[in-house]
Image (spheres, rainbow, N blue to C red):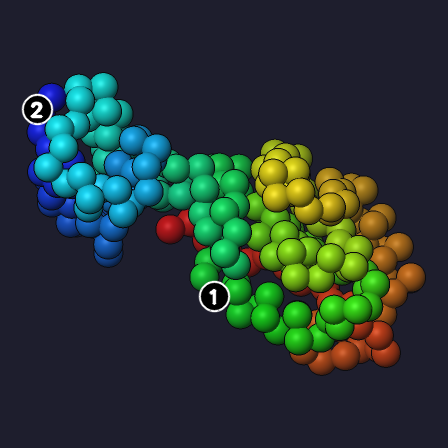
Amino acid sequence: MSPTATIDGSLRQAAGLLQRCSDSPRLDAEVLLAKVLSRPRSALVAHADAPLDAAAAKQFRHLIDERRRGVPVAYLTGTREFWSLPLNVTPAVLVPRPETEDLVELVLERLRPDAPVRVLDLGTGSGAIALALASERPLASITAVDLSAAALGVAAAGSRERRVALRFVVRARGRRALRRHRRESPVCRRGRSRARGAEIRAGAGAVPG
């Protein structure tokens, strides 16, 4: 990627470098270059013949090298879309899987929009499930629990940026929160009610990639 390279030429070269380490090399290259240029991916197409300056080319090459080493794109950009929400993602959390949106849909089917229900998200990680539920059920009281303070920091930052009110509990306090939650509210899990009521307990399953 020389200083006089065009956007399209840089993308084609980067996609070639990613062929062996990514199932979507062109997409990865576009997302990373869009991050470098602070532009939407559509702008890369509209300005395909525009030159890429030396500083941008250097930063882009660094990101491509990191991706070739197996670093997930979400860690390189710091974001991952989930439930149409741009989530904060760092190595402190796992990258939310698209299939986890199926769990959100299942939970939403059991949470009435007009009911002030209580929800406990165990192992919240990036806060993907908690934030998605909060965006759809503003009356719900949602507690996000994780053993990692760093992970809760990521989720809390996402909560502030999305202007979504969540309660966060970390480490040993999470065990006390769970015991109190069990005493105060009924629990539904995996779609089968274990008691009468509308509370859902969900864990945020995710893997890097």
* Frontmost residue, 140 versus 194: 140
- Counting from the top left corner in percent of width and height, residue 188 is at 75, 73
Label 2 SS: loop
Residue 151 is at least partly visible in this image: no
- Counting from the top left corner in percent of width and height, residue 19 is at 15, 49
- Labelled disc at residue 99: 1
Asked if residue 24 lies left or right of residue 99, the reply is left
* Frontmost residue, 195 versus 147: 195
Asked if residue 91 lies left or right of residue 55, the reply is right
Asked if residue 195 lies left or right of residue 48, the reply is right
Above or below, 141 against 33 in this view is: below
For the point 67% across and 42% down, which residue is it?
163
Label 1, label 2: how far apart the Cα atoms are:
41 Å
The type of residue carrying mark 1 is: Glu
Give neighbour class at mark 1: few <14, some 14-19, many 20+ (Cα, 10 Å): few
The type of residue carrying mark 2 is: Thr
For the point 62% across and 73% down, which residue is it?
106
- Labelled disc at residue 4: 2
- Counting from the top left corner in percent of width and height, residue 72 is at 36, 44
* Frontmost residue, 204 versus 113: 113
Label 1 SS: loop
- Labelled disc at residue 175: none
For the point 32% across and 37% down, which residue is it?
39
Q: Residue furthest right?
A: 184
